[in-house]
Image: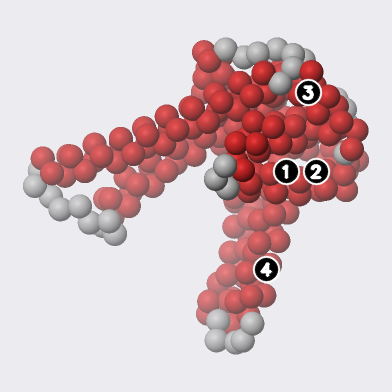
Amino acid sequence: MIESIKKAFGAYSKTPFPFVWASLLCVFLLIVCVLAAVGLFLIYFMLLSAFEQELVLDAIPTMVVAGVIVLLFLFFANGLNAALIMAYRKALAKEKISVARFFSYAVDRAPEMSGIMVVREFILLLLIGPFLAIYIYFLQEYEFMDILFGTYALFMIFAAHVVFKPAFVLAGGYGTDIFNSLKLTIDFLRRKHIFFIGLYILFALVWLLNFVPFVQIATLFFAYPVVYAAMIVIIENSVKIREV
């Protein structure tokens, strides 16, 4: 873990611009995706106005449209995550990614990244869903059960994100398909699970700091690239990857 961080920090300190550039591209394109999602909803609102229909947020058509827009946003956001991983990996080799390459790679890898996300969320549903039903129908009235269930749910969410993060890194950074990404993830976690958990906790803290005003400037363009690059390094050094 420490060696991976040292290598990532060394690469960043020698040539920081490719890392900063990758973060800038991701932030810019993510903002574009957000604006596009808002634009799609505004189009729906204008269509309702054209047909003299009132916008009701809890109406089924509105919920369906909102759901489709959210799914489209998540699809492209997953693609941007893949492109960001690839750009950080190239930055470790002192290579800078063009805007066109970043965008095209994001579009190409979005299906695989979204597929891994679907698998992760399905497993989370299996792990949390039954307990949620038991809590709602049988245990909701008991004291401290909400805290107990909330703690369990948070632990399961964190554990699932730890387990599936290497799959996202492999699919995004090396172009592996869903099956091979998950297969290599199992192989990696068998060897480096303790070290990766520690690294992922650090990554989670840095990710949360990305939402703190002013602090996010340092995390987005320094801490986040270094920690993400460290995850790439530890995975690359632990399993044999056949790059696509």
* Residue occupied by mark 1: 203
Q: CA distance from mark 4 to mark 1?
A: 20 Å
- Indicate which disc residue 13 carries: 3
Disc 2 secondary structure class: helix
Residue 89 sits above or below residue 180 on the image: above
In the figure, residue 87 lies in which quadrant? top right
| Nearer to us in this view, 132 or 227 | 227
**What's under tag 1, amino acid-wise?**
Phe
**What's under tag 2, amino acid-wise?**
Leu
Closer mark to the observer between disc 4 and disc 2: 2
**What's under tag 3, amino acid-wise?**
Ser
Residue at x 53% of width, y 76% of height? 136
Q: Which label's residue is closer to the chain start, 3 or 1?
A: 3
Q: CA distance from mark 2 to mark 3?
A: 20 Å
Residue 26 appears in view: yes
Find out whether the residues at labels 2 and 1 contact each other: C-beta distance under 8 Å: yes
